[in-house]
Amino acid sequence: MTSLSSRASQLRIKLATALGDRKAVYFGFVRKNYGQQQIETLISPKLIQLMDKILEEDVKDSQLRKVSLDGILSAWKSIIIDSPQLAETEICRTQISNRIVSDSNASITDLHASQLAGSLCSNAQSANTQIKGLTVTPENIGSDIQSAVDRSIEKLSSDERRLVNAQNKQIYLIPTIILVSDLIQVTNGKKVLDTLAGDIKISDSCQRAKDEAKNYSIRIENIVLVSDGFASTKGNIDTELRDKLREYWKCWFETRGIYDQDLGTRGINLGEI
C-alpha cells in the first residue's frame, strides 16, 4: 500500500495543477461513524468561479488574459508547492494580490486582485492543513466507508446548489470520488465480510446492500467512483467472498446513484488523476 507521506506529496502535486484544470478538490479520511465524518474543501468551486469572473470582467485582451491566468496559477503554485508556509501568514493576501496585479499588467483591479488573493490564500491554508494531516498518524480513523461516501455526496450537493452563473442559471458539478480503501465496511464493530459469508448466492449480497441502504434522496448526477485498495486487507479473502463483496458494493453504490464504478484499481497516483 502507498504510504500516507507519499499520498501527501501526490495530493500537493494534484492541487498545484487542479486549479488550472478548473477542478474543485475535496478531501476526507474515512472515520468510525457518520458523526465523526468530515469532508474538507481544498479547492472550492467558488474560487474557480471567482477567477473566471474577474478575468472576464477585467482583462478584455485575449492574449493578456492568458498571461494573467498564468500569473494567477503561478501565484497559487507558490503557496501550494514553493512556499506553503506563506498561506499561514497575514501577508499572504497582500503578496499574492500584488503578484496578480503585476502579472496582469494592472488590468486586474486592486479590489479584484485582493478578493482573489484572499480566496487563494484561504484555500491554500485549508489544503496545507489537510496535507499536514497525512504526514502524521491520523486520529479517529475507521472503516465506515458508507458514511464517508454519503458525507461526500452531501457536501457536493450543498456546494452545487450555491453555484449559479451570471445569468442566474445552475452550474452542475461533474464529480469523481477517489476512495482509497479496502472496502471492508465495519458497522457497530462488525465487518461486512462476516455478514456476507452467510449469503448463499452472490445475488443475496446485492439484495442485502439494497435492504441495508437507508432511504437516501440526495443525488448528484454522473458521479464516477474509483476505488484504490479493494479487498487488500491483511489475510486472504477467498474468491467467492471477494465476489460477494464486489457485488455488495456495486449494488450499494447504485443506491446512491453511482453507476460508473471502478473497484479494481491498484496504486493510484493522486498527482496524475
Image (cartoon, grey):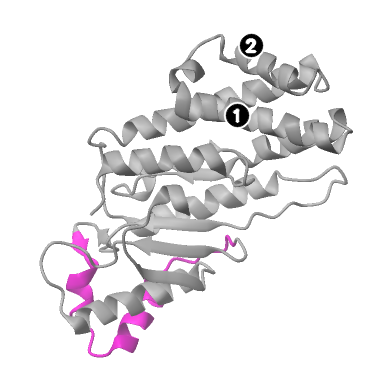
Query: Which residue is at the front of the view, 177 or 150?
Result: 177
Tell me if mark 1 has few (under 14), some (14-19) or many (20+) residues whose alpha carbon lies within 10 angstroms of its own.
many
Q: Please state which amino acid type lies under the numbered disc 2.
A: Thr
Q: Residue 196, position in %: x, y?
A: 23, 77
Query: Looking at the image, which residue sits at the far bottom?
Result: 201
Residue at 56%, 25% in the rendered image:
122
Give the mark, 2 or 1, whose residue is nearer the N terminus.
1
Q: Which residue is mark 1?
A: 74
Task: Please tell me whether residue 84 is drawn above or below residue 178 in the rendered image.
Answer: above
Vertical arrangement, residue 73 with respect to residue 115, above or below: below
Distance from the alpha carbon under mark 2 to that under mark 1: 15 Å
190 vs 95, left or right, is left
* Left-right relation of 220 to 238: right
* Image coordinates for residue 164, horizontal then vertical, percent: 77, 46
Residue shown at 74% from the left, 31% from the top: 67
Look at label 1 and name its amino acid.
Ser
Which mark, residue 245?
none
Give the image location of residue 79, x and y in percent: 51, 24
The extreme left residue here reads 235
Query: Which one is nearer the viewer's eye here, 80 or 41?
Result: 80
**Residue in the picture at 57% in, 57% down:** 175
Point out the image quarter for the N terminus.
bottom left
Residue 179 at x, y percent in the picture: 39, 57
Above or below 60: residue 98:
above
Helix, strand or loop for disc 2? helix
Residue at 72% across / 22% down in the picture? 103
Residue behind mark 2: 94
Compared across the picture, whether 116 is left or right of 109 comes to left
Q: Which residues are magenta?
A: 190-219
